[in-house]
């Protein structure tokens, strides 16, 4: 979730956990970090492309611009990582957080969305039960 969503993508990018089969980013900070040493994230043999990335994102999230989302996707694909982006229309940042319901939250870019929260959780369970297979989502 949020910063954790970015952290799991970095685990996949840097091949930090070679046996990791899949990661899920809920309203994560989507970006394309500069990788100083491309060899670190190249992977080899069975490692390359071994971690699937499921990105669950609110299309109205002000913290990840459409340009950042596109850069994130292209960066993951350039590294050979399987990726699927699910965008929830008119949904803001923090859509899984039921306490984010005040006008101040809305103005700050946060809003709980029960439908997106339920759908994203169902997708996550299907993804995990399938061992990180994006086709299950």
Image: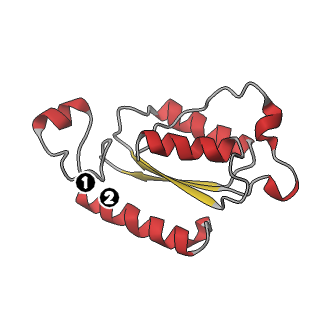
Q: Measuring 30% from the left and 46% from the top, which residue is drawn there?
A: 90
Q: Measuring 81% from the left and 47% from the top, which residue is drawn there?
A: 43
Task: Name the secondary structure under disc 2.
Answer: helix
Residue 67's place in the image compared with 44, above or below, is above
The label shown at residue 125 is none
- Is residue 41 shown left or right of residue 5? right
- Is residue 134 shown left or right of residue 103? right
Q: Name the residue under label 1.
A: 113
Residue 17 appears anywhere in the view: yes
Farthest residue toward the right?
45
Residue 36's place in the image compared with 60, above or below, is above
- Is residue 113 shown left or right of residue 79? left
Residue 137 appears anywhere in the view: no
Could you say where residue 11 lies in the image, as x and y percent from the top left? 63, 45
Label 2 with label 1: CB-CB less than 8 Å = yes
- Is residue 43 shown left or right of residue 122? right
Q: Quadrant of residue 35?
A: top right
Task: Name the secondary structure under disc 1.
Answer: loop
Q: How many labels does the image show?
A: 2
Compute the Cα span from label 2 to label 1: 5 Å
Q: Label 2: few (<14), some or many (≥20) within 10 Å?
A: many
Between residues 8 and 73, which one lies in front from this camera angle? 8
Q: Label 1: few (<14), some or many (≥20) within 10 Å?
A: many
Between residues 18 and 32, which one lies in front from this camera angle? 18
Color scheme of the displayed model:
secondary structure
Farthest residue toward the left?
103
Could you say where residue 31 lies in the image, as x and y percent from the top left? 54, 33
Q: Mark 2 points at which residue?
A: 116
Could you say where residue 2 lies in the image, as x and y percent from the top left? 41, 42
């Amino acid at each position: 979730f949020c910063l954790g969503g970015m952290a799991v993508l970095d685990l996949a990018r840097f091949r930090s956990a070679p046996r990791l089969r899949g990661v899920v980013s809920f309203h994560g900070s989507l970006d394309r970090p500069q990788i100083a040493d491309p060899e670190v994230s190249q992977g080899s043999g069975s490692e390359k492309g071994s971690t699937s990335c499921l990105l669950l994102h609110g299309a109205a999230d002000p913290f990840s611009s459409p340009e950042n989302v596109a850069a994130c996707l292209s960066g993951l694909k350039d590294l050979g990582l399987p990726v699927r982006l699910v965008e929830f229309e008119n949904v803001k940042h923090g859509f899984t957080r039921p306490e984010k319901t005040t006008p101040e939250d809305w103005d700050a870019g946060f809003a709980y969305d029960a439908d997106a929260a339920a759908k994203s959780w169902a997708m996550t369970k299907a993804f995990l039960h399938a061992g990180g297979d994006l086709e299950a989502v």
